[in-house]
Amino acid sequence: MSYLLPILVHIPAHSQVAGPLIYQSESALPPGTLVRVPLGQRELLGVVWDTPVDPVVASLDPGKLRPLAAILDGIAPLASCWRQLVTFTADYYQRSLGEVALAALPPQLRDLSSVQLARRLKRHATTPRHESPPTVIANGVKQSGSRPVSGIGGIEATRNDETGTFVISHSLSTEQVAVTARFDQEAGPFLLFGATGSGKTEVYLQCVERLLASNASAQSLVMVPEINLTPQLEARFRQRFDALYGAHAVVSMHSGMTPAQRLQSWLAADSGAARIVLGTRMAVFASMPQLKLIIVDEEHDPSYKSQEGARYSARDLAVYRGRLENAKVLLGSATPSLESWHHSRPLSEGGRYVRLEMPSRIGSNASLPLVRRVDMNHQPKHCVIAPPLLEAIAQRVARGEQSLVFLNRRGYAPVLRCADCGWKSECPHCSAYRVFHKIDRTLRCHHCGYAERVPRTCPACGNPDIAPMGRGTERLEEHLAELLAAVRRPNSDPELWPEGEPVRIARIDADSTKLKGALEAQLARVHSGEIDVLVGTQMIAKGHDFRRITLVAAIDADSALFSSDFRAPERLFGLLLQATGRAGRDADSSTGSEMWLQTFHPQHPLFEALKRHDYSSFAAQQLKEREQAAMPPFSFQALLRAEARTQEVAQGFLTAASAGAAELPQSQQVTRYPAVPLSIQRVANVERAQMLIESPSRAALQRFLHAWQAVLHHTRQQPDGKGLIRWALDVDPLTI
Ligand SMILES: [Zn+2]
Ligand SMILES: [Zn+2]
């Protein structure tokens, strides 16, 4: 007797074969079983997706179907919740099930043969696990006969020798106590709106700790936006939990790990051995049979939105998954996305999230930095750093304090230009300029990566006088070194520096941190006080604690004020408020900490709100504008993107697809805008265009997109689709 099993495999995107393929099997394997199946000449990983099909009903001839190649019986069938999460993702983000399911599994599962995998599983099973976990009473009353336990940093922990019970007490702020109490009592989902330095991480630790203490098998998932942020988070979680639950209880999951490490983490999560999974957006798909809590830190961060394949939002999927698996969800941010902020309005006004607020910074003197606006209209022409700002930085250097100077443009200069003929360093493959990097004398395209040595003379007219225009972090670093050449830092070694010790400047951006470990090494130099002035891009405004920095300056704060992207002000405000949060996190030095903004529009409401550290009023004003303009979160959007060798072909496909949609009954509640080129319309010789689709109803937009799929595939096959390289839908796009 043989069974016909529907099995998902990874097939190329947009293949018309969107559902499972049918294979023969000698046993009726349960849905969720991992198998290997033949496809053409290859053998692929597959997931049994459903109960066996009836050959008569499906009018299939079993004799023509191929049998399974192998069953990965070392891994239990994936839970129906996990399959439901995959189904929802594929459905909502308009991708094939097989693509989403297989991309959600660790790559080594796909690559290893069943024999190799069996060997790997055996090794995994023999890894020593912790013995039965000790019982923990968090924030409980200390019991008699207890002794202190060392090695659990920063907290008081005592172990009762008779019962083996840990009793821990952390000193929490009043706000932290209130927030965790509400978290315990209510169902959520929660939005934790906490100022930078208010102790959000401690709240996360508390929530996880209470969960693990109350339920011996519960698992929690903690997500951060960037790989760079996982080591410091992992350190804090290990410090808290390794001693309680063993070194295998905390695992990480992100793309910076080796395939073998990722597989190991995945297996630990899947088997339930890992109690805490820390990871980037991909971790939202981790198979966790006992998942009871999901935390999304810095929930506003655009990195949670995938930019390729299924363009899913891990933040939004976390909320969906929490509901699906009955796990509590906690989103946290000092500058929430306007979507989440809107969802956390009062229940009586239609809110769906519970808003938890922690407005105060921790520490006796931890006041928020003073925000100072420098009106660049009244500064010397072409000055890069206004004299009062320069003076403020110099004073801090002399006092032994640190400053952070922030410019969101890396490289030396964005353009190289010939003064004679007007030649500029355009990229031959993109509609963008190549950036001048002085450090290795190259012109580099930040879009396609094309790099060349800087020419000695103008390639167009031979003039040797070609000069950089504008300024990136590299040039700013050089410029600051000149401006501060005469300034002296407190002398650490008068014998070595009889004339006084010169200022030390460092730079942190994507260029200076390319090598593995470079970022950590540079951060360590900042933390040790070795650096006086740190220059960097938005990289340094994100998540890193710079406790000794007392001045943060944004050199070009205006860059996003008048952008065509309606989310630009939200991102700018978030970035600047996060940057102010970098200043003076040490209570001792924060009394005098300042945020300086160089702007030509000092009265702009965004800066007014920033000066008051007032996210709420900024958000209220932005939401009002968006409501009037019927923009998200008051409407729902999708983008159809097309790429081709020519702009005509790319736009032609979009226009034809739009015309084809006119007949669909589902198009009634949906607005289709005209096709337009992307703001950088050509990258690596590929022309890019897009079309915005909008609806006041999420359900109507979804119905339309589903109906439109057939039109899109059909248009692709028609003359209008000739020359098209690829197309893709982006549901809930973050940049338009
Ligand atoms: Zn020239
Ligand atoms: Zn290029």
Image: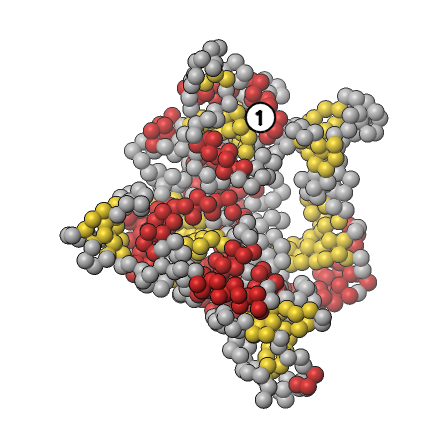
Q: How many marks?
A: 1
Q: Is residue 393 above or below residue 229?
A: above
Q: Is residue 661 above or below residue 61?
A: above
* Outermost top residue: 499
* Outermost right residue: 461
Kindly identify the residue that appears in the image at 32 percent across and 43 percent down: 153
In the rendered image, which quarter is residue 594 located in? Answer: top left
Of helix, strand and loop, which one carries label 1? helix
Mark 1 beta carbon near ligand 2 (under 8 Å): no
Residue that badge 1 annotates? 477
Callout 1 amino acid: Glu
Residue 69 at x, y = what percent?
A: 62, 75
Query: Taking the image as drawn, is residue 573 in sight?
Result: no
Kindly identify the residue that appears in the image at 42 percent across and 24 percent down: 401
Lateral position of residue 709 relative to residue 181, left or right:
right
Residue 12 at x, y = what percent?
A: 68, 64
Residue 331 at x, y = what percent?
A: 43, 52
Query: Taking the image as drawn, is residue 483 in sight?
Result: yes
| Quarter of the figure that contains the N terminus | bottom right
Please rate how many residues cluster around mark 1, counting C-alpha atoms within 10 Å: few if below 14, some from 14 to 19, many from 20: some
In the rendered image, which quarter is residue 290 located in? Answer: bottom left
**In terms of depth relative to the viewer, which is nearer, 671 or 733?**
733
Q: How is the image coloured?
A: secondary structure
**In terms of depth relative to the viewer, which is nearer, 348 or 455?**
455
Lateral position of residue 218 relative to residue 142, left or right:
right
Residue 562 at x, y = what percent?
A: 60, 37
Kindly identify the residue that appears in the image at 58 percent across and 50 percent down: 734
